[in-house]
Structure formats: structure tokens, C-alpha cells
């Protein structure tokens, strides 16, 4: 697929990115340039509408990584406010994301706000989970919007997929360029790293990252985005040797109460 989602022409203006915190621990990601904006995984609409209207931005696209309500719940109301906006989602998940207007699959590419976007199928958390990868180009860095597959210091629960699928998905995402910024959809980093430190108490990289994250959270700062390089070194799921190890780690995290 080659789609052009009402993107701005090549511009000297940089692509800007921001987080809108919503609900208890969700983030809605916003990308904008030259008065046009796209959002990723809008759990709710009202804070997103307010944020965009305050900046006089026109919503042209909504990117959906998967069907869970805390990722798509705000999209219908956003479409009522901006009815011309495109909704990009897995076409294999059309039944659960019926308002999508651009169904995509593995290997598809499209242009968004002057940037090329590559679609990656990364099942494990759900069977039709996708990620959106913006490779570095023209002096702008690489970005990854990975929903609930790869978290900062963790990974999503295996609700519909298998440990083998998640292992392969994480290997794929962490094979991207080390400087790629990782925009996941939840502020789970501190709890993920507390668990990781209990699993690997002698690991200095995890201990140092946990200390940094605690300082950030004490200041009320988000810990997102992460980077691929940071996940390679401090994410136990991403470091797992095989699906069996990942399954053991996932069960340990599921029952962790620290």
C-alpha cells in the first residue's frame, strides 16, 4: 500500500511530537507540522480535542496500534470533530476497529506529515497488533509507536498471542536503529524496572535506569520516549534468549506485587 494521508508537503518546519497524559497511566502521542496533526492511540477524546484546538491544529490522521478500548475509545468523538481525518489500523482487525478508513498490514508504507511510515505486524499482546515505524530521514530522527507490545522496561501481557510471537515481535522492534525513540502507550516504566531489579538485583544498568526513572517521576516527568538502545540493555523481555525465558519472565511480572 502507498497512501498519502493528507500529509504536508516537505517543509523546513520540523516534525514535532508530544504526549498527552490521559486516564490513569495512558499516553496519547501527537505528531504535528505546519498546522496539521496526527494522534496515536487516543483513549479518550476531550483532552486531545482541547490540546489540538489550543494550538490551532487540524487533525488529519489517527493511528491505531490495536483494538483495546483504552487505545481506540476516543476516536469516534475525534472523527465527529474532524470528520475528514483518516484512521489507520490493521485491516485484519476491521471487525474490532470498524471506523478505520485505511486498513494496513505488514510491509505497507504511507506518508504522514511529510514522513515515511512503515507498518510492522507485532503480535503477542493481541493477535492483530501493529506498530508504526518512522525511519530517520532528512535530519529527523527515527520514531517507533509500538502501543502495548514493547514498553519501557517491559512488554504487554499475552492476552491473545503466544510467548513465541511476543519474543519475535520484541526481537524485531529492538533490531531497529539504536537511536530510534520508543513511544509506548503507558507510564509503566517504574513498576517494570522495580520488577526487573528484583529479577536481576546485580544488574547495574537496570539499577541505574531505575534510579533515573524514580527521579523523573518524583518531578512529575514522563519516562517516555525510551530508545531502542536503552531497551536492549535494560529490558529483560527484550533480552530474553528464547520464548521459554520470555514466558517465565511474563508470568513472574504478572504475579509481581513489589
Image: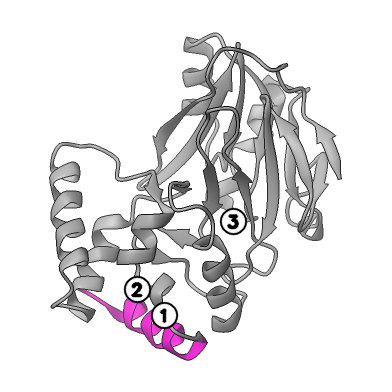
Q: Would you say residue 152 is visible in this rendering?
A: no
Is residue 14 within the magenta segment?
no
The span shown in magenta is: 243-258
CA separation, marks 3 and 1? 26 Å
In x, y percent, where is residue 57? Answer: 58, 14
Q: Relative to 187, does residue 122 appear above or below in the rendering? A: below
Of the pair 52 and 110, the residue shown nearer to us: 110
* Secondary structure of the residue carrying numbered label 1: loop
Q: Position of residue 98 (x, y in %)?
A: 79, 48
Residue occupied by mark 2: 236
Compared across the picture, whether 107 is left or right of 238 comes to right
Q: Residue at x 74, y 50 (%)?
A: 97
- The image shows residue 48, relative to residue 229, as above or below, that is above
Residue at image mark 3? 68
Q: Position of residue 193 (x, y in %)?
A: 25, 64
Q: Along the line of sight, which residue is nearer the eye, 203 or 76?
A: 203
Q: Residues within 10 Å of mark 1 (few under 14, many from 20)?
A: some
**In the image, is residue 254 part of the stretch drawn in magenta?**
yes
Residue 152 horizontal/vertical position (percent): 37, 57
Q: CA distance from mark 3 to mark 2?
A: 25 Å
**Mark 1, residue position:** 240
Amino acid at each position: 500500500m502507498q497512501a498519502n494521508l493528507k500529509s504536508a508537503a516537505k517543509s523546513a518546519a520540523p516534525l514535532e511530537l508530544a504526549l498527552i497524559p490521559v486516564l490513569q497511566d495512558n499516553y496519547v502521542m501527537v505528531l504535528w507540522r505546519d498546522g496539521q496533526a496526527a494522534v496515536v492511540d487516543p483513549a479518550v477524546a476531550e483532552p486531545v480535542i482541547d490540546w489540538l484546538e489550543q494550538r490551532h491544529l487540524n487533525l488529519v490522521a489517527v493511528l491505531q496500534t490495536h483494538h483495546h478500548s483504552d487505545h481506540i475509545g476516543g476516536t469516534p468523538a475525534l472523527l465527529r470533530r474532524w470528520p475528514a481525518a483518516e484512521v489507520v489500523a490493521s485491516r485484519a482487525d476491521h471487525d474490532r476497529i470498524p471506523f478505520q478508513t485505511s486498513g494496513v498490514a505488514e510491509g505497507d508504507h504511507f506518508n504522514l506529515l511529510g514522513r515515511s511510515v512503515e507498518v510492522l505486524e507485532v503480535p503477542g499482546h493481541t493477535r492483530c497488533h501493529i506498530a508504526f515505524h518512522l525511519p530517520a530521514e532528512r535530519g529527523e530522527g527515527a520514531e517507533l509507536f509500538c502501543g502495548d507490545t514493547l514498553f519501557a522496561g517491559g512488554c504487554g501481557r499475552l492476552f491473545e498471542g503466544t510467548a513465541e510471537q511476543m519474543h519475535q515481535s520484541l526481537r524485531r522492534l529492538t533490531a531497529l536503529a539504536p537511536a530510534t525513540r520508543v513511544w509506548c502507550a503507558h507510564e509503566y516504566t517504574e513498576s517494570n524496572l522495580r520488577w526487573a531489579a528484583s529479577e536481576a538485583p546485580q544488574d547495574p544498568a537496570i539499577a541505574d535506569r531505575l534510579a533515573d526513572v524514580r527521579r523523573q517521576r518524583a518531578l512529575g516527568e514522563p519516562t517516555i520516549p525510551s530508545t531502542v538502545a536503552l531497551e536492549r540493555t535494560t529490558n529483560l523481555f527484550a533480552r530474553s534468549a528464547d520464548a521459554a525465558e520470555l514466558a517465565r519472565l511474563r508470568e513472574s511480572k504478572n504475579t509481581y506485587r513489589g
